[in-house]
Structures are given as structure tokens and as C-alpha cells.
Amino acid sequence: MTHVTDSIVYVGVNDHDLDLFEGQYVVPNGMAYNSYVILDDDIAVMDTVDAAKTQEWFDNLEEALQGRLPAYLVVQHMEPDHAGSIDRFLSKYPDVVVVGNAKTFTIMEQFFPLTAVEKKLIVKEGDTLNLGAHTLKFILAPMVHWPEVMLTYESSEKVLFSADAFGKFGALDAEEDWACEARRYYFGIVGKYGMMVQNLLKKAAGLDIAKICPLHGPVLTESLGYYLNLYDIWSGYRAESEGVCVCYTSVYGHTRAAVELLCRRLEEAGVKVSLHDLARDDMAEAVEDAFRYEKLVLATTTYNAGIFPFMKTFIDHLLERNYQKRTVGMIENGSWGPMAMKVMKEAFKNSREIVFTENNVTILSALNEKSKGQVLALADELSASYQTK
């Protein structure tokens, strides 16, 4: 049993059986489904866990309760990895009052049409719930990243239960860098909703927060400004790091050869380069780095008068997450009718503050002296701003 504070107990579980989160994100270190118990005159349970881990969660819960019965179940997020055990929880503790907002209960009825919630407390923005020594204040956070999401602030111990905000991939018994997996998680799961996250950060700025308890990942207890600042950068679509993210597809190796020449030139100039083969590498990692770095190079072949499928998928991932405020360079390859650059530029026509490089590259089948010169010119343009700093 893990204590967040003397009266707040962590009762979540690690899932090492999961290989793909939400059916698409590779999670080599599994996932944590977090749940918490606030022990007071009235006991509140903060969220449940995925249905695959209900029994393990019940074991943790019973250890924390020490024979007492919970008074409330606070449902901050109805996604099944957090709400999947609600029906079994209510069967076990039928007298519990379920706390949520109006949208919470609408979605709950959709997921559990056979579960009648007999006792419910519907809360609005700013409503409070007194448990005894603890008082919960509810903060609505629609579209971070579902419409019913809400956060809960406990004022006596200054704890923010943050739903999916400030979460990360990976089980809690895995050793890994927080920012790397939190960044991949953020842009994969929440990236489209930057404006809503910015609204949430404004609300959080008015709170005195000592600990953040997310529904995934570790409880955050130190240097909270670091995490809040990263969320501000990510949700503001600003670059986090200097450098160039280079993403490519290559059929016969000629586009790859151009990319390798580009990367060598950039690295010789002292520029940080992150390179991704979109046909082989984790697409979510490529998306993460495209948002992390301030410059992006897209290199691909013309394919059926369009672009290679992996590149199309990658650009679609960027656009649906509101990719913006970046410099973008391009390398295209085509044997008889190069079209890739035109198609890629057109894809970004509605994106905000995208600046295309002046030097871009057209390869006719294989690199020659002319196209090699274009590659070097593109590298020099991309590195110029760093050399003047």
C-alpha cells in the first residue's frame, strides 16, 4: 500500500499485459491505471481502473479501506481504462454515491446500460464536497481529452487529482524518463486540444498545488513548475528544443541517401538531428519529435501522383493535432513527374505559422551533383539560425 499523504492512498495497478494503448500506441513498459482513496469521515474513491485489472484493484482497495466502506466514487473520466470497473464497484458497494458532472452520467449510461446508478451527485464547475477534514473542489476540463473530463482539487493537503492531464505511458515499476513518455502520451492523446489545455492551466494557476495525482504515471511531488511549464509549451504548440526532426520514406534507398547527406551536414554544423524512417519506426515517436523540435524536414517519393502512404499517414497525424509554428523543409523524389512537394505543401495550407524553407530538394530517381547541392543548401539554411546565436 502506497501513501500519497497520511490520508490519501494510492490503490492503482500496473498492466504489463498491454502491448498497445488505445489500440495504437506501443507501450513496451505497460501502463499504470491510477486510483486513489481519500480516508476521512466520509471516504472517497477517486476513479476505478480498466476491467482487466478489477480484481487486483479490489485487493488494493480493501487493503486501504481496512474494513470501512467508501461513501463516494468520484468519476473524473469515463474512458474505459479508468471507468471499466464502475459496474463491479457499484455491485460491491451499492450504497456509494457516484460523483460526476452531467456529461459523466450521459456517457456512463452508454458504457453501462444495465447498471443503474441509484445514488448520484451531479457537480458543476467550482462545486465542493466536504469529506470531514478534506474538501474537494471540482474543476471542469472539457476535451482534455473527452467532453466529461473534470479534475478535483483537495484544498487541505493541496493535492490536484488531474485526470489524464500530466499522465504518461509506462507502468509505475518501470524506470524511464518522465518527459519522453509524457510527451509522446500528450501529443498522441491530448495534442489536438491545446486550447482546452491552456484553459485548464489558467485554472490551475489559481490553485496552491503541492502534489499532482494523474490517472497515468507517477504522482508528481517536486519541481511542479517543470511539469506545468512543459504542458504550457506543448499546449501552446511552441517548440520545446532547438533542432531538426527529419522524417522520411524511401523505396529504393535514394531518398534515404539524400536524408543521410542532409543529416551529416546538419550534425557537422552542430545541429541536433532526430531522424525517423516512417516505414519502420514508431509513428508516435516521430509525431512526438515533430512537435518537440522547431524545424521539420519531410522527405518522400511521389507515389500514384501523390505521396508515399507512410508519409501521408504521418502528415495526417500532424494535421489532426494542429501542427503549427514550425519551419518545414522538403525533399521529394520522382522519376518522371515529381509531385510530392506540391502535395505536401498543399496539405499544410490551413496550418498556422508554417514557414517553408527557401531551399528544397527535387531528386530525379537518384542523387546527382545538382540535387546534392540542393541538399547541402537546405542543410545550410536550416543550420544558419543556430550559427548566429
Image (cartoon, rainbow, N blue to C red):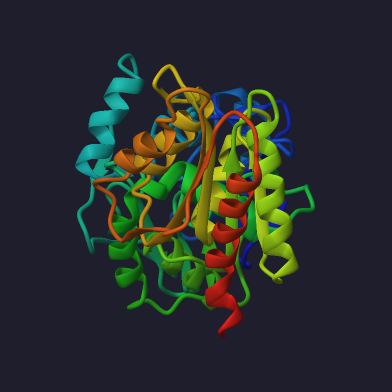
Q: Is residue 99 above or below residue 80?
A: below
- Looking at the rendered image, the quarter that the C terminus falls into is bottom right
In the rendered structure, the answer to whether residue 280 lies left or right of residue 78 reads: right
Tell which of 189 and 64 is nearer to you. Answer: 189
Residue at left offset 68%, top offset 35%: 59
In the rendered structure, the answer to whether residue 346 lies left or right of residue 296 reads: left
Q: Quadrant of residue 25?
A: top right
Q: Position of residue 260 (x, y in %)?
A: 71, 47
Q: Position of residue 99 (x, y in %)?
A: 32, 45
User: Residue farthest to the front?
Assistant: 369
Residue at left offset 42%, top offset 68%: 232
Q: Quadrant of residue 178?
A: bottom right
Q: Is residue 314 above or below residue 327?
A: above
Q: Position of residue 291 (x, y in %)?
A: 49, 55
Q: Is residue 40 above or below residue 43?
A: below
Residue at left offset 56%, top offset 52%: 374
Tell which of 272 and 117 is nearer to you. Answer: 272
Q: Is residue 195 visible?
A: yes
User: Residue farthest to the top?
Assistant: 114
